[in-house]
Image: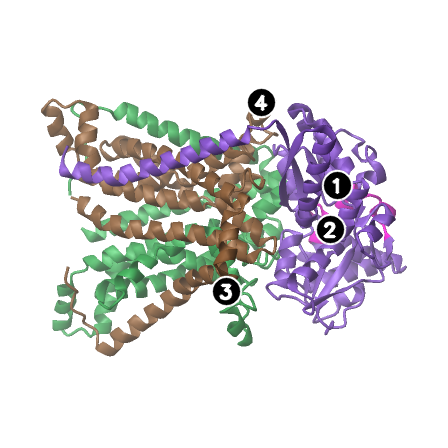
Chain colours: A purple, B green, C brown
Amino acid sequence: MTVQGRRLLRPAGALAAAVAVLLAIHAASGRAADAPPSVEILNASYDPTRELYRDVNAAFTKAYRERTGTSVTVRMSHGGSGKQARAVLDGLQADVVTLALAYDVDVLADRGLVRPGWQARLPHNSTPYTSTIVFLVRSGNPKRILDWADLARPGISVVTPNPKTSGGARWNYLAAWGSSLTAGKGEAAARELVAGLFRNVAVLDTGARGSTTTFVQRGLGDVLLAWENEAHLALAESGRGRVEIVVPKSSILAEPPVAVVDAVVDRRGTRAVAEAYLRFLYSPEGQALAAKHHYRPRVPEAAAQAGRTFPAVATFTVDRLFGGWRAAQKKHFDDGGVFDSLFVNR
Amino acid sequence: MRTARVTPSLLPGFGPALGVTLLGLSLVVLAPLATLLATSLRGSPAEFLAAVTTPRVLAALKLSFLLSLGAAAVSALLGLLLGWVLVRYRFPGRRVLDALIDLPFALPTAVAGITLTTLYAPNGWLGKPLAALGVPVAFTPLGIGVALVFLGIPFTVRTLQPVLASLDPEVEDAAASLGATRVETVRRVLFPEVLPSLLTGATLAFARGLGEYGSVVFISGNMPMKTEIAPLLVMTKLEQYDVAGATALAVVLLVSSFLLLLVLNRLEAWAEGRRR
Amino acid sequence: MSAPRSREPRAVRLVLIGLALAAIGLFLLVPLAAVFVEAFRHGTGAWLAAVSDPDARHAVKLTLLVAAIAVPVNAAFGLAAGWALGKFRFPGRNLVLTLIDLPFAVSPIVAGLVFVLVFGRSSLLGGWLAGHGIEVVFAVPGIVLATVFVTFPFVARELVPLMQSQGTDEEEAARVLGAGFFKTFLRVTLPNVKWALLYGIVLCTARAVGEFGAVSVVSGHVRGATNTLPLHVETLYNEYATQGAFAAASLLTLVALAAMLAKAFLSRHAGEEAP
């Protein structure tokens, strides 16, 4: 072999060694993984539930092992609610979905991944916890933002995610719209309020978490529209004294649903675990964890148990004001809907 | 320069090598892209046209094209400056700086995205003074432009460097001895030599910028009609269950990429011709 | 090579150098510094904790695994393309060259989207695969495919022009002297293009390790399963874990710096290979 040929061998040898080391690591990790008999399930969830499910998964794993002797690993995937439903639709092997709104589960039901009538299979419309939409403002509330009408005032900079992709943002939008309706002002006024609000929007992230980061860490905007739980988390993360929560007089009752993805659990044989996992959310321990993370539990005692108090808000539901999610989606958020017209005609 | 001829009698392996090439190309590139085209053609041409001409899609396309074009122009200017300084002048640290030019190419786009956003946010190192001057960068079209310029620099610099290095300084001396001022020499002698490569580099930067996602999505603010780029809108449409709209827009981007490649081929041939 | 004599006045030269330094500083050095400042904002301990977190470790492993598959595949493809397109001329050659370049110009989002369209559950092929329990998208195979796609041209782009400019004389001589195809290829062709090959491999590796857009479309973002390192950076960034995100980003930046060093070193040698 020529001198040149040998020079070539050195880097090539290093590369081969690196690959060999890698494969060894991989093989070792593979062996380690299948040592104890265990079940793995995947929970595809929306953005702001990361902290909640970290705790729930740990508690459920422990409780399930004690009860059945099986060790469960719950894997998580987080993203905008619509994005997650889309991924499941395209083949993401999620055993359960815990999404931001019922419409995204309905889409899965339409395609046969979740059985029809899924919402009646678990208590409370398959919503183990609820939330509402509140405002996060800069400390001292310098712009005096107290209720929905303030969001449409000129000179207010609003941060909310994009209703097209984020479930939370659709709740934000409907909360604003509904607040005007419940005040007895009618459709035209509601439309004007929401139009003014979105005229004031500075940044429209794709997911709720992106918006929170924009508001809290990037310092953009005067007010963030957020899930109550997300607002509390942001408050804790940013350190008190920089932002504060404003609860509007009326807001929407946000019901984030959970469901077993029947097509996936039947194929993987994980139905028992997946159903136990969702039922665990309704257990006293699950409810307390929800309350701890500022989701409003279905069992009121759980709030006290977790040491949380939730301010009273006059809430309205999507079913009552908008005729359910399918109707709301079609009228407001589908292409060519009200939301599009607000943006195009500005 | 010698070019290869078809010599099948002497050199073996043409068939198998071409077979592997075409098979790889078909499996990895052509079949998936053909699926995209086929999916987008499921509806009627009118539906396709309607999907890509909604105001929001047009705004995103306009934003993507204009910003990529502007960023390519700025990258080209920076490329001229950096290429010239790195090739023509000698100063301490030149080699290190020269190697650094590749950073935007080598750095993962997600890293570039979060870093630029952190730097140019209203409370960032660069964003704070700029915001004080009344120039918000992050979450505005300007922020997207900054990210695209960052991305484009290596393409223009690396395309220009070999040409600048191959320029014969004696030609410049000859022009000078014939009475041309330095500015005239640069304009009439150097610039025409460099132009094809300058355009090639700028087109590469443009093509890359048009499709860029990772480094832009964090800094853009994603406002429909204002700071929403076309690739992000593809994602958004997919996530709102609008597969037809997503594929239609993707096809527009794909066709643009292909046309840009054809332009690039022409430019490269022109540059080659000049150098001979 | 000696420095070419400058023809500009000293003042112009200094101003140009100053401007260039300012541009490089502002556009390249400041972001580079920011990555490490943010990564070590809470000290070395926090950095170590972030990069040794099980999810981070899994992301590193997955990223390396994907690169370890994608890079050799594309190196082999690049050599085949170099031989077929560099040493021979045939009708349609230019079209093939342009098509090889296509992934370079295609938006990563479009690249990801096409694989979801091909292998997603709603497609024919995807439905069939799902029926047989084979996962492609939202699993490791999809990530590998997307990575192979976006890095497809990198080796071929380096090898085809070089092999074309080197011509076929040496190979023909070897053949006349009785060498077979493999001997000719290994002893004559490969040594002639080795630096360009390594150069292409370095570019390909850097992009494979760092790919974000295409992979994010096909990954499904499952922590500890389908999150590559760039996706892990995004995940942490979205969890208020800014320091952790930058800690993971600093690892990727180190890979990028290594790739840049290797590229600078190799490009000097690759220049020698041009005839």
In the image, residue C113 lies at what x, y percent? 54, 39
Find residue B225 and report its horizontal and vertical position in percent.
61, 57
Callouts 3 and 1 close, C-beta under 8 Å: no
Q: Quadrant of residue B90?
A: bottom left
Residue holding disc 4: C128
Disc 1, disc 4: CB below 8 Å? no
Q: Residues within 10 Å of mark 1 (few under 14, many from 20)?
A: many
Circle number at residue A103: 1
Q: Please name the residue that numbered disc 3 is placed on.
A: B119
**Disc 1: host chain:** A
The amino acid marked with disc number 2 is: Arg
- Farthest-out residue, left: C177
Asked if both marks, 3 and 1, belong to the same chain, the answer given is no
Name the subunit of mark 4: C
Q: Which residue is mark 2?
A: A170
**Could you tell me if the residues under marks 4 and 2 are in contact, i.e. CB atoms within 8 Å?**
no
Residue type highlighted by circle 4: Trp
Span colored in magenta: A316-340
Determine the CA span between mark 4 and mark 3: 47 Å
Q: Could you tell which of marks 2 and 1 lies nearer the N-terminus?
A: 1
Looking at the image, is mark 4 or mark 3 nearer the viewer? 3
Amino acid of disc 1:
Tyr
